[in-house]
Image: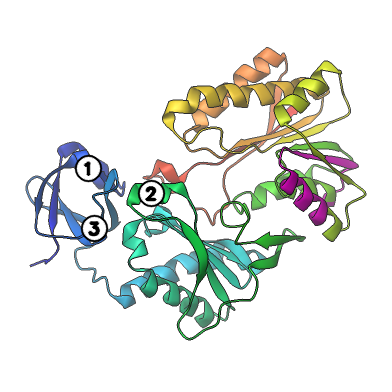
Amino acid sequence: MRSYPRFQITKKAERSVRAGHPWVYGEEIVAVDGAYANGDLVDVVTLKGKYLGTGFVNDHSKIRVRLLSRNANDRFDEAFWERRLRYAIDYRRTVMPGRDFRCCRLIFGEADQFPGLTVDRYNDLLVTQTLSLGIEVRKDVLFPLLAKVLRDMGETVTGIYERNDVKIRALEGLEQGKGWYALPGEPVPASPVTTIDENGILYDVDVENGQKTGFFLDQKYNRQSVARIAAGKQVLDCFTHTGSFALNAAKGGAAHVTAVDVSAEACRMTKGNAAKNGVADIVDVEQADVFELLDRLEADHVTAYDFIILDPPAFTKSRKTVHNATAGYKDINQKAMKLLPRGGYLATCSCSHFMTEDLFLAMLRDAARDADVTLRQVEARQQAPDHPILWNVPETAYLKFYIFQVV
């Protein structure tokens, strides 16, 4: 007889769970049998009492239960968590071999059956982001095991930094904060800054102050695809952040790259990274609002660029604002298409889950029509495989990336 509290769910929720989705919302729960505290493990059952899975419960969250197992025989002891961590990390060693394994996402939340947990690796520093109470109350088990599993594989781990400075934690009743996680009996590193090598390009990563966990790892192989076609091109890299697409284009043999970002700090970092990689003479950095810059280039009939890269931040983080976001995406893409000469190239992407593939493609078709251009698709790509997509969990698919030629 199982000892966990039992949560009965609606027929609709049962269909979702049986289809593989790991979330049960509060309004989908019809009865609760047993006492529990938020963060505890609970069983989810059908209206007839048939077992469906076990997960973390949290009354503070709209997602009342986050499932992590569908096996009634699982025992959630230290050995269970170690097996699951090892499974996730072994996957990365396979799909991100060699140098790429030293700089990748090790845990991608629900896609690795760790609801609400992100772990990124930057050489010997690990960065965690905990977005569920169930993980929060178990981190003293999980984080030392994480270091152990990597060290057992011959990898070096000098420290774990927690980046819990995100508003979404409030939805789980969790406080925001950041700082070193003290591994038992070990000193914390002296500095939160490390240097990574991605695609043969060096970047300084500040895991304490950088965006997200310090760097955007999901575009790793999309940057390579830009480098492959950049030779001899005059490149305009919009929303450059730390210059990653710009540097890949320069390393790929671009004649010249103009990297643009509205943030003064982003521009400073891009200049530093260009100098670190010996391409400061090829990469110019301009602080500007991309929307205003594209308007100005169009008004001035500038035709200097034959490769434009659009890597904007997520214009929408909810379904309610998708319409406004679509207008923003269309605006920059249409302007870029008009600026490119016949035979020019456009790399464009969206990192918002709510801007679905269908919506993004429809927007690109509208932009091309209004720009009076024909697009020839070169590549269609998604996030790197260290951010795996579970087909039963559409929320795990978020990055759309296309390269076109204007013909």
What residue would you read off at disc 3? 38
Residue located at (76% from left, 21% from top): 295
The amino acid pointed to by label 3 is Asn
Q: Which residue is more in the foreground, 145 or 112?
A: 145
Q: Which residue is more in the foreground, 90 or 268?
A: 268
Say which element carries label 1: helix
Quarter of the picture holding the N terminus: bottom left
Q: Which residue is more in the foreground, 322 or 165?
A: 165
Residue 23 x, y percent position in the rendering? 29, 47
What residue would you read off at disc 2? 170
Instruction: Bin the neighbour count of mark 2 within 10 Å (Cα to Cα): few under 14, some 14-19, many 20 and up.
Output: some
Q: Is residue 213 magenta?
A: no
Is residue 368 in sight in this rendering?
yes
**In the displayed structure, would residue 34 be above or below residue 191?**
above
**In the displayed structure, would residue 124 be above or below residue 318?**
below
Q: Please tell me in which quadrant of the rendered image residue 26 appears.
A: top left
Whole-number angstrom distance, CA of label 2 to CA of label 3: 14 Å
Instruction: Bin the neighbour count of mark 1 within 10 Å (Cα to Cα): few under 14, some 14-19, many 20 and up.
Output: some
What residue would you read off at disc 1? 26
The amino acid pointed to by label 2 is Ala
For marks 1 and 2 on the same chain, the one whose residue lies earlier in the sequence: 1
With 17 as the anchor, is 402 left or right in this view? right
Whole-number angstrom distance, CA of label 1 to CA of label 2: 17 Å
Q: Which stretch appears magenta?
A: 251-273
